[in-house]
Image: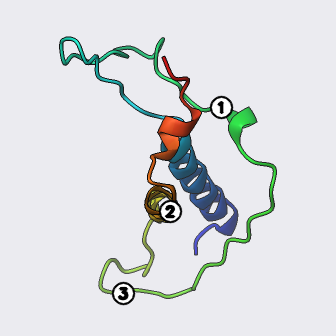
């Protein structure tokens, strides 16, 4: 780990992105003509810091060097934090038979 603080921040950002994607973000299709109903950011619900839950999340890293990748033995963590949100969202869909985004979106 070159910088544990920034790695934790990146992982937390990925987790919150996955959570927001599961609960808030969606594209809507107009049933009348099959076109996108929310074609711009004005109609697209984008999460903000206030949407983040106020909970403590423990982030643990396993310190492993991989000399095959590069001489330093380090890799970026990328958006790996989003993986868990997809699994939890799918579990919710199977448990309640409805997508989480459908539960928070106002019905018309």
| CB-based contact (under 8 Å), mark 1 and mark 2 | no
Where is the N terminus found, in terms of image quarters?
bottom right
101 relative to 84, above or below: above
Read off the residue under disc 1.
48
Residue 54 left/right relative to 46: right
Q: How many marks?
A: 3
- In which image quadrant can residue 86 be found? bottom left
Q: Closer to the camera: disc 3 or disc 1?
A: 1
**Picture coordinates of residue 74 (x, y %)?**
45, 76
Is residue 78 in sight in this rendering? Answer: no
Q: In percent of the image, x 37 and y 16: which residue is there?
A: 38
Q: Quick one: label 1 or label 2, which is nearer the N terminus?
A: 1
| SS under mark 2 | helix
Q: How far apart are marks 1 and 2 (CA)?
A: 28 Å
| SS under mark 1 | loop
**Picture coordinates of residue 40 (x, y %)?**
38, 14
Q: Quick one: label 2 or label 3, which is nearer the N terminus?
A: 3
Read off the residue under disc 2.
95
Q: In percent of the image, x 65 and y 63: which residue is there?
A: 8
Q: Which mark is residue 18?
A: none
Residue lying furthest left in this view?
33
Q: Closer to the camera: disc 2 or disc 3?
A: 2
Read off the residue under disc 3.
67
Q: How far apart are marks 3 and 1 (CA)?
A: 38 Å
Q: Closer to the camera: disc 1 or disc 2?
A: 2
**Picture coordinates of residue 72 (x, y %)?**
43, 79
């Amino acid at each position: 780990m070159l910088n544990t603080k920034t790695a934790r921040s990146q992982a937390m950002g990925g987790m919150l992105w996955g959570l927001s994607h599961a609960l808030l973000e969606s594209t809507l299709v107009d049933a009348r003509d099959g076109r996108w109903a929310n074609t711009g950011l004005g109609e697209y619900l984008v999460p903000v810091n206030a949407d983040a839950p106020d909970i403590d999340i423990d982030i643990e890293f396993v310190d492993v060097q991989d000399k095959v990748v590069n001489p330093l033995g380090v890799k970026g963590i990328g958006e790996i934090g989003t993986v868990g949100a997809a699994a939890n969202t799918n579990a919710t869909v199977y448990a309640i038979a409805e997508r989480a985004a459908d539960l928070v979106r106002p019905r018309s």
